[in-house]
Image (tube, helix red, strand yellow):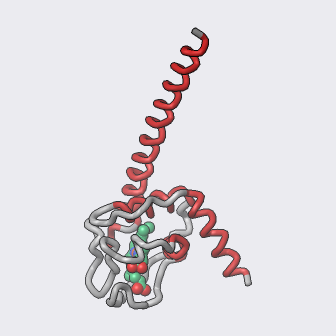
């Protein structure tokens, strides 16, 4: 009897954990969407399509769904004004920096843009963002 009680308890605990983690993930994306709407939408637009020649698109952009998370974190934190070729095109506007966003907020907004519209990349964790920021600080300190 003791055993089956324990099994029952473990089963319940696993279900709870699953539920909580699914809920947290949904909240992260909700939160990412809110950050996107207040800080990014004005330039990158609600469909992530950007503005031709001015603001780079995020939907279908190879860098946005790519594996270089550190580069994405750096762009969000420090802004971006490099006038480099992005998927064969150039953009004239300057992206503003977001020094006020916490690592958790950066991971939420990156997760949102990597999984929205036609983008189907992996989400980004707060830990990945923290690692990327540590890397950035090393580079800028030398
Ligand atoms: C003032 C307009 C503006 C705002 C606000 C803005 N961006 Fe940008 N973003 C740009 C421009 C312009 C570029 C391209 C800059 C260049 O080519 O030098 C860019 C580039 C990017 C890139 C790189 C795309 C690629 O293909 O490499 C990412 C990722 C990005 N923005 C995400 C965001 C996110 C997330 C936010 C909100 C936190 C945001 N941007 C807010 C204008 C903006």
Query: Is residue 43 in view from this perspective?
Result: no
Above or below: residue 58 compared with residue 82: above
Quadrant where ligand 1 appears:
bottom left
Residues 38 and 63: in front is: 63
Residue located 28% across and 63% down the image: 117
In percent of width and height, residue 89 lies at 32, 89
* Residue 105, x across and y down, in percent: 50, 58
Residue 141: x and y in percent read 72, 80
**27 or 70, nearer to the observer:** 70
120 with respect to 21 (left or right): left
> Is the residue 103 above or below the residue 50 in the image?
above
Query: In the picture provided, is 79 more to the left or to the right than 87?
Result: right
Q: Residue at x 27, y 79 (%)?
A: 51
Residue sitting at x 43%, y 90%: 84
Query: Residue 2 appears at what percent x and percent y?
Result: 61, 11
Residue farthest toward the top in the current orientation of the protein: 1
Q: Quadrant of residue 32?
A: bottom left
> Which quarter of the rendered picture does the N terminus lie within?
top right
Q: Nearer the viewer, residue 123 or 27?
A: 123
């Amino acid at each position: 009897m003791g055993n089956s009680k324990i099994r029952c308890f473990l089963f319940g605990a696993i279900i709870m954990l699953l539920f909580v983690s699914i809920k947290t993930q949904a909240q992260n994306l909700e939160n990412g969407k809110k950050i996107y709407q207040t800080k990014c939408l004005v330039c990158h637009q609600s469909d992530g399509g950007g503005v031709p020649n001015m603001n780079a698109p995020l939907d279908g952009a190879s860098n946005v769904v790519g594996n270089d998370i550190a580069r994405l974190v750096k762009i969000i934190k420090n802004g971006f004004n490099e006038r480099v070729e992005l998927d064969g095109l150039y953009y004239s506007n300057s992206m503003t920096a977001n020094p006020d966003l916490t690592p958790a907020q950066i991971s939420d907004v990156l997760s949102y843009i990597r999984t929205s519209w036609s983008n189907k990349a992996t989400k980004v964790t707060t830990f990945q963002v923290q690692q990327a920021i540590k890397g950035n600080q090393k580079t800028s300190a030398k």
